[in-house]
Amino acid sequence: MKEITYGKPICLSPNVRRITVPNPGRMTGPGTNTYLVGEKNIAVIDPGPVEESHIQAILDAVGDRLKWILVTHTHPDHSPGAKVLAEATGAILLGNVLPVDDGHQDNSFVPQENFTHDQVLDGGGFHIRAICTPGHVDNHLCFLVEEDNLLITGDHIMQGSTVVIIPPHGDMKAYIDSLQLLKKYTINYLAPGHGTLIENPENEIEGLIQHRLGRESKVVKTMKGLGEISLEDLTPKVYEDVDKSLHPLAKYSLWAHLLKLEKDQRASHKNDRWCLLET
């Protein structure tokens, strides 16, 4: 496991290096990870925010070999650096955007090409497969470096914590389905958007699925016998095991769980009051 350092490329596999943005925080962990794929021709994935020292570290590492800039999604800690890098190098911008901005997206990212599910970028020495993984946000992608069986996960999987799902562009049902989808691919390592390299990907993915389903079961158990209840009142009951300072974020995930239960025809709501449809 390669530890986090700032400003210095760390080799993770034959084709992949990582540079971490010095933007540590509650939502970013030790910082946002940028990945460099390839040697002769280079693809940069998630160049991060426009942080001068980080952008310069990328430019120093790629020289005149940067051909493509990819983003997993357009949250402001992942994609704003893409425009700056493209202007400096002429590299092609690749990724997907939301049709309607939810107020949390980087509008400076305008891709020259969009990805379809399972589309493969041939880098002349490496291949990157784009896997559509909606859930954290609708336009989220993971990128599988096929020669190394290494999956660059963006915010779909984070090391050491679960990701926040914020409706309406975050979708718990889609998130769990996207985790299930990853089981179909040959993956030896997970390279997250925040944190260090994750080994035993099968265990990690299944653990995340079971964690989310376990929380869903707790939601159902807690709501039984309560009748109609507001999201605000339900949050501390479902997340009594979570520090109260995190309840404002937990409320979003609870909302996502309730929307999944509604899609599964197990719950319904009117305005902000929810109830179970099962006994």
Image (cartoon, rainbow, N blue to C red):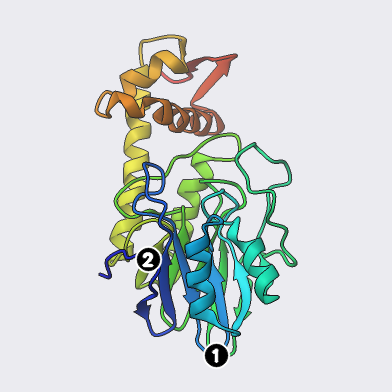
The quarter in which the N terminus is drawn is bottom left
Q: Could you tell me residue 113's position as x and y percent?
A: 73, 67
Q: Compare residues 46 and 261 and report the one nearer the observer.
A: 46
Identify the residue at image location x=55%, y=72%: 44
Q: Is residue 181 left or right of residue 242?
A: right
Identify the residue at image location x=63%, y=72%: 119
Secondary structure of the residue carrying tag 2 is: strand
Secondary structure of the residue carrying tag 1 is: loop
Which circle marks residue 40 in the picture?
1
C-alpha separation, residue under disc 2 versus residue under disc 1? 24 Å
Q: Could you tell me residue 243's position as x and y percent?
A: 27, 28
The quarter in which the C terminus is drawn is top left
Identify the residue at image location x=59%, y=60%: 81
Q: Could you tell me residue 246's position as x and y percent?
A: 35, 29
Q: Quadrant of residue 188?
A: bottom left
Q: Compare residues 261 and 83 and report the one nearer the observer.
A: 83
The kind of residue tagged 2 is Leu
Crowd tier of the residue under label 1, counting other residues whose Cα lies within 10 Å: few below 14, some 14–19, many 20 or above: few
Q: Quadrant of residue 202?
A: bottom left
Q: Is residue 83 left or right of residue 161?
A: right
Which circle marks residue 190 in the picture?
2
Which circle marks residue 144 in the picture?
none
Q: Compare residues 19 and 133 and report the one nearer the observer.
A: 19
The kind of residue tagged 1 is Lys
Q: Which is nearer the N-term, disc 2 or disc 1?
A: 1
Q: Could you tell me residue 58's position as x and y percent?
A: 51, 72
